[in-house]
Image: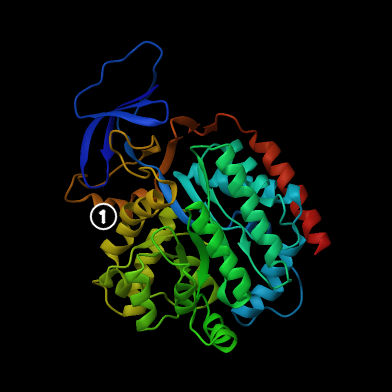
Amino acid sequence: MILIKNGTIITPQEVFQGDILIDEDKIKQVSKEPIKTVTGVKEIDATGKVVLPGLICAHHHLYSTFARGMNLGGEPAKNFPETLEKLWWRLDKALQPEDLYWSSIPPLVDAVRMGVTTIIDHHESQGYQKGSLDEIAKAVKKVGLRASLCLGVSDRYDKGIEGIKECERFLKKFKKSPNNKLHTMVGLHASFTVNDITLNNAVALAKENGVGIHVHCAEDISDQEETVQKHGKRVIKRLHDAGALGEKSIAVHCIHLDEEEMELLKTSNTNVVHNSESNMNNAVGWSNVIEMNKRGILVGLGSDGMSSNMWREMRVAYLISHHATKDPRVGFMEAINFLFKNNPIIAKRIFGQELGIIREGAAADLIVMDYLPPTPLHQNTVLGHILFGLLDAHVETTIAGGDLLYHKGKFKKLDIEEIKQKSQEKAVKLWQRI
């Protein structure tokens, strides 16, 4: 058991001084009155600190880590299709088993340091698919946070059948040995790289196992153009007609959509995940999440592998909304709600449990932050502190599923020097192969 004492608790719907008692993997008690200490309970003094629910990243690419600093030479990519061909597809084709483990550990470590306790990951490794999800699962278990994993199946190297088999194998393994911190979905890369046979097989597999589809949608206009050319339908319409949409599915990016596609996302209750930093980095455009939000589409936030910093994703989502709409009145509440309200709803749909929320009976995913509020911090001011202060504050403690992963700058089970050495060693060898 863990007792967090005398912290400023931000739910963030409410702000109050209090204690939180954790029993195994659940929040047992949240109290505005002091909770009596019991023998054998580990106490964390949060006096002068703030306590928040662990953050959720609704779309990550742990495999992308080794692209950091990589120089492939040649002319820089001038558009997104060239970025895929010159960088990402070369990288994911060259990945080997140990690369997956050692490229996953650093962003997971960063996540814990930044208060992220749940990640919904989307993996790509066309050169090594069979068994690939086991390597990432091993890394997740080592670091100790919570994750939903999937392989992004693609036919770009005629490996769609192999990819479906890996998804099926991991689903069976997950069912045989369930883990309350691990989950799996059926992944697809994108409509333009998936043929009808693979799409239909993926949907059938997902429905058979009661999980959703995790897929990039209209990230670039080329996805729409190729999908219409090959299949006679736009991206969301094609996925809808195949049965791939729904409340357990995740449609990532959703930048180049028309009116019909937005309506299909709404009526199917599909989760949309906005990745503001990545969209800007790839120069693919702005996803009109303000309009989606008005229409009642559930929009969450992911990082798309750019980083594990969901605080920054929230702020960039807020800022780009101002820039794209030329209206300083929009984006404030939306960006905060995407992270603190909608991501927990998406996570509950995916994992089947209460995550990212401070409530008795919810998962014990909590963070303690060292934050000096320069102005009064209470219910009427908390959102301003979240967007303009807390994102720069230091995470002192991270707890996931009742496990104390990180406290006062130290990890409970990890050798950070070994991680740095091994990941750098594997990265250099990968670069040489490419």
Position of 308 with respect to 164 (left or right) is: left
Q: Position of residue 154 (x, y in %)?
A: 65, 68
- Identify the residue at image location x=41%, y=54%: 311
Hey, which quadrant is residue 84 in on the image?
A: bottom right
1 relative to 56, above or below: above
Pick the front one: 402 or 164: 164
Pick the front one: 38 or 150: 150
185 relative to 142, above or below: below
Position of 142 with respect to 243 (left or right) is: right
Residue corresponding to mark 1:
384
- Identify the residue at image location x=44%, y=47%: 351
Q: Position of residue 328 (x, y in %)?
A: 26, 73
In the rendered image, the quadrant that contains the C terminus is: bottom right
- Identify the residue at image location x=75%, y=49%: 97
Q: Position of residue 316 (x, y in %)?
A: 41, 64
Q: How is the image coloured?
A: rainbow
